[in-house]
Amino acid sequence: MDTAWAHASEIAAAVSDGRTSASAVVRAALARIAADNPVLNAFTAVLEDRALAKARAIDAARLDGRPLGPLAGVPFAVKNLFDIAGLPTLAGSKINRDRAPAQHDATLVARLEDRGAVLVGALNMGEYAYDFTGENVHYGPSRNPHDVARMTGGSSGGSGGAVAGGLVPLALGSDTNGSIRVPASLCGIFGLKPTYGRLSRARTFPFVASLDHVGPLARNTRDLALAYDAMQGYDAEDPVCGQRPTEPVAPLLDRGSEGLRLAVAGGYFRTGAFPEAQTALARVAAALRVTDEIEIPEAKRARAAAYVITAAEGGTLHLGRLRTRGRDFDPAVRDRLIAGAMIPAAHVAKAQKFRRWYREQVLALFAKVDAVLAPATPCPAPLIGQQTFVLDGVELSVRANLGIYTQPISFIGLPVAAVPVPLAPLPIGVQIIAAPWREDVALRIAHALEKLGVVRANKPSVKGGK
Amino acid sequence: MQMTRQAKSSKGKAKTSRKIPQRDALDELVDAAARALDLQLEPAWKGAVKANLKVTLALADLFADFPLPDDAEPAPVFTA
């Protein structure tokens, strides 16, 4: 079978019934990475020996008649802030090259491999995840498979590029303010930022502890759900991981959006968007027959408070490294972190108080609706190196403002599925935002939109790798 | 949004809100904070640090005066 654009679920089925082998699937993925990564720059490490050994073990298990997992033979890769045994956890930095190699895999890597998935490598990212562009001064920019002169978005830039470029069907990223949803939008793929505390962050390099999430990126909803289901479950090694039962979503996808009350986010989320973002949102709303609009109160202040908390917590986390190794940072990241360390504490404390107030207001909305639709990014992928864009007549930093629609949502930990609308020439995403712990709602709607043909991950037609 | 706090005239209408320090004051804040935090700022970094701090303080200004009761609980809660 041609696994270059196959769904993870199709690969797992083919491996499980012997139509192909895990070894063949993994060798094909490694060959694609060798061919296309020099252009896409998605990978910072390729784990050929480890991946082939794991694949051989899966094939041996099948020959022995042992049951295989729901992700049998599915190649995947992880943003390089996830611990991988034997490698220093770079988190996109030069400084972390000096760390000791990780002793163990991150919890989510281990859980995916327990279900049969095969880790093939570590992925490029913005330094220390303080980034929405996917650019990196140390390792070079991740490149968008739909136009390699353009950004992937970040900070999970390699995750976006690897999945959209067909190198792997599944990747993991992290999302503090939008770092899964922004690259999903710019690269035209699906991303899930689960509820804060749903998936374990154990053995990942942190950025902003009170905002950090982790989750999957894939080329369709079912693959997101399969990966998400495989990764759920309490983990005592992440202090904020919720003690909740596993709530599988994959079996619920075919329920679709029937009976769900939906609305489009108004007010703040109607400002600043390029025409493409507005078109994408309109298409999704029309397909779902959504006519209601709902105001998420004080979203502009929420975004501001998320920005301040991020800067302050990030600056605090890195203060020691800023003192001793300032020159080894990406300058664009360093200068933001230093500024963050200088923010008066009064602003940070107020931001956290505002955050709880805002959460209560937004949660009250979910008495009226089950999900809210909003743009994922204000524009399709900017050019690599582009410093500014104009939103509503104001010239703003791209790096700091690609996440204006994602920040007010992750600020209070709501689950979001980012779905790709295949506009030409560049795709752009829409957020499906649900109440806490209702990832099922967001993914059911995403799946319904896929069935309607409104959202899909298009195979890139512009590519420089072959 | 008011980006600077100008020294008020003798007309006595000085606003009591704490807005963003004026340009020189922000320079002083950067220098003083760097000393207090034991951060060695190279001269070439200061402009970008100041610009980032200015943006961040302007955003903080959006919610700094948002009315909340004294007993409003901050979001992160530690559960023993």
Image: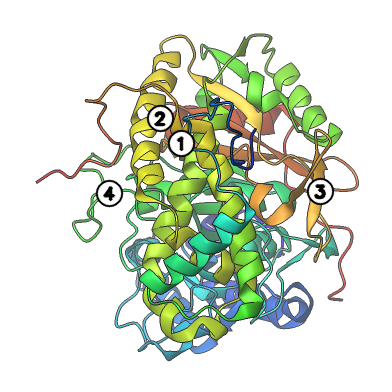
Q: Position of residue B24 (x, y in %)?
A: 61, 58
Evaluate if marks 3 and 4 touch, with contact meaning CB atoms under 8 Å apart.
Answer: no
Residue under mark 3: which chain is it in?
A
Badge number at residue A415? 1
Please give the residue where the numbered disc 3 appears in the rendered image: A389
Q: Is disc 4 placed on a helix, strand or loop?
A: loop
- Between A392 and A120, the one nearer to me in the picture: A392
Front-most of B8 and A139?
B8
Gap in angstroms between the C-alphas marked 1 and 2: 7 Å
Work out whether residue A267 or residue A348 is closer to the camera in this orientation and state it. A348
Confirm whether circles 3 and 4 share one chain: yes
Q: Mark 4 highlights which residue?
A: A233
The residue under the point 67% across, 18% down is A288
Badge nearest the viewer, 3 or 2: 3
Which quadrant: the C terminus of chain A? bottom right
Q: Left or right? Give the position of A141 relative to B59.
A: right
Residue A156 in view here? no
Q: Amino acid at mark 2?
A: Arg
From this view, report whether residue A439 is shown above or below residue A284.
below
Mark 1: secondary structure: loop
Sequence-wise, which precedes: disc 3 or disc 1? Answer: 3
Residue marked by disc 2: A438
Residue drawn at (55%, 25%), measured in percent from left and top?
B13
Q: Are marks 1 and 4 on the same chain?
A: yes
**Quarter of image, res B75:** top left
Which badge, 1 or 4, comes first in the chain's sequence? 4
Q: From this viewpoint, which residue is outermost toward the left?
A: B80
Q: How far is disc 2 from disc 4 in space, using C-alphas? A: 15 Å
Amino acid type at circle 4 is Gly
